[in-house]
């Protein structure tokens, strides 16, 4: 079968490899769709945990074609999306429903095994996945389902964690209206009563119409912090989700957060801000503010997102590519020429 694999830092190529066989507790999926994410760009440029000859792709939707020993509750022909955190389902975090923070792999600073990152993923004609990582998608478009496994899941996780702070009369801020940010706006509108403000580099009125946010401001405005505070009558934002994660955006978030507000730093651009245990903050961090670096989402979160999609409550701008054009898709995403999410269709012929 064909598979998109990391060969060495800076080089990803399409190889012919053996079709895998499912082992204990696993299923074999005929991959119907595999999302292309900025994580794939990062892996190609600077592999942090990905070994040579690993098949990329952590957003996977497919049809079950074979079932390994010990699998119950699934049958061939069913369509499913794969959760990107392959949890142990035994540790205290898993028992608490926080499988995305699973401790079963025994490593403090790394997430659970992740397809396309630390083990073979879904940018291939067939892929192996643990049966307990699957969520059935029924007749949901597999291309849409695939991107929900990350681009929908990560924003939903952040929105769920902010629900208690986003009551009636509150305002939320979304920084970055890329693939994840567009989902975040929709989910904030669906799951909270908060007014939603967003900032993006795109032309603001167009971005506002496309995203569904109440207000969209341009990120390069010289008085952006003042404009943002005006949107909250000077009080600040109760919840902020930063999908960029640069030093500039993190400092902006700190300066416009409300007292007892919360900042979710989802973007991984490498920014940092100081945390000061002092009476006065040099970056304007109010009292009671929390800063969190969330990862992915729980298994229940993914089931919730798929349910919302199957009810027709979510939408996405998708651009389809055959598997043979995977490198083109990664290149276009890295250069900023994908408005939404790129999806590979390995078995579209």
Image: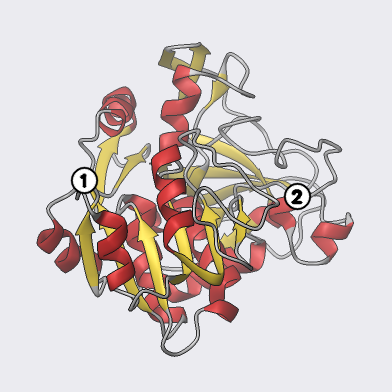
Q: With respect to residue 53, does 149 lie above or below? A: below
The residue located at (32%, 23%) in the rendering is 327
Quick one: label 1, few (<14), some, or many (20+) residues within 10 Å?
Answer: few
Q: Disc 1 vs disc 2: which is toward the camera?
A: 1
Quarter holding the C terminus is top left
The residue lying furthest to the front in this view is 279
Find disc 1 in the rendering and name its residue. Answer: 220
Query: In the visual, does 135 lie left or right of 339?
Result: right
Q: Position of residue 13 (x, y in %)?
A: 41, 15
Q: Residue pushed farthest bottom?
A: 168
In the image, taking residue 271 as reference, residue 194 lies left or right, namely: left
Q: Position of residue 275 (x, y in %)?
A: 64, 47
Circle 2 packing at 10 Å, graded few (<14), some (14-19), many (20+), is many
Looking at the picture, tell me which residue is in the foreground, 237 or 278. Answer: 278
Foreground residue among 228 and 218? 228
- Residue 102 is tagged as none
Tell me where residue 11 appears, x and y as whole percent.
43, 11
Residue 331 coordinates in the image, percent (x, y): 28, 25
Q: Which residue is mark 2?
A: 87
Q: At 65% across and 58% down in the image, what residue appears? A: 279
- Position of 55 with respect to 349 (left or right) is right
User: How far apart are the two marked residues, 1 and 2, measured between alpha carbons?
Assistant: 41 Å
Q: Secondary structure at mark 1?
A: loop
Is residue 88 at least partly visible in the picture?
Answer: yes
- Of residue 303 and residue 18, the one placed in the foreground of this image is 303
Q: Is residue 124 visible?
A: no
């Amino acid at each position: 079968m064909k598979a998109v694999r990391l060969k060495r830092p800076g080089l990803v190529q399409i190889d012919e490899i053996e079709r895998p066989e499912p082992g204990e507790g696993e299923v074999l999926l005929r991959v119907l769709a595999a999302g292309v994410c900025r994580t794939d760009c990062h892996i190609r440029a600077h592999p942090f945990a990905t070994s040579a000859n690993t098949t990329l792709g952590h957003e996977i939707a497919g049809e079950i074609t074979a079932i390994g020993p010990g699998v119950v509750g699934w049958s061939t022909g069913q369509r499913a999306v794969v959760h990107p955190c392959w949890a142990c389902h035994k540790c205290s975090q898993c028992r608490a429903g926080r499988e995305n923070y699973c401790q079963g792999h025994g490593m403090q600073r790394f997430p659970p095994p992740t397809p396309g990152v630390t083990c073979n993923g879904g940018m291939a004609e067939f892929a192996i996945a643990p049966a307990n990582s699957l969520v059935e998608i029924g007749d949901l478009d597999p291309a849409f389902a695939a991107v929900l496994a990350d681009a929908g899941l990560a924003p939903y996780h952040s929105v769920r964690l902010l629900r208690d702070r986003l009551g009636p009369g509150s305002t939320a801020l979304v920084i970055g209206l890329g693939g994840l940010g567009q989902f975040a706006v929709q989910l904030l509108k669906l799951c909270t009563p908060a007014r939603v403000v967003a900032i993006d580099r795109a032309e603001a009125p167009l971005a506002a119409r496309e995203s569904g946010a109440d207000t969209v401001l341009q990120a390069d405005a010289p008085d952006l912090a003042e404009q943002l505070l005006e949107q909250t009558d000077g009080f600040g934002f109760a919840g902020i989700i930063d999908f960029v994660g640069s030093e500039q955006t993190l400092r902006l978030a700190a300066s416009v957060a409300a007292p007892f507000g919360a900042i979710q730093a989802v973007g991984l651009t490498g920014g940092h801000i100081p945390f000061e245990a002092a009476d006065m903050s040099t970056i304007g961090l109010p009292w009671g503010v929390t800063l969190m670096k969330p990862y992915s989402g729980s298994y229940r979160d993914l089931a919730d997102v798929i349910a919302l999609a199957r009810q027709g409550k979510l939408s996405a701008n998708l651009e389809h590519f055959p598997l043979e054009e995977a490198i083109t898709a990664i290149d276009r995403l890295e250069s900023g020429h994908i408005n939404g999410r790129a999806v590979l269709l390995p078995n579209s012929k």
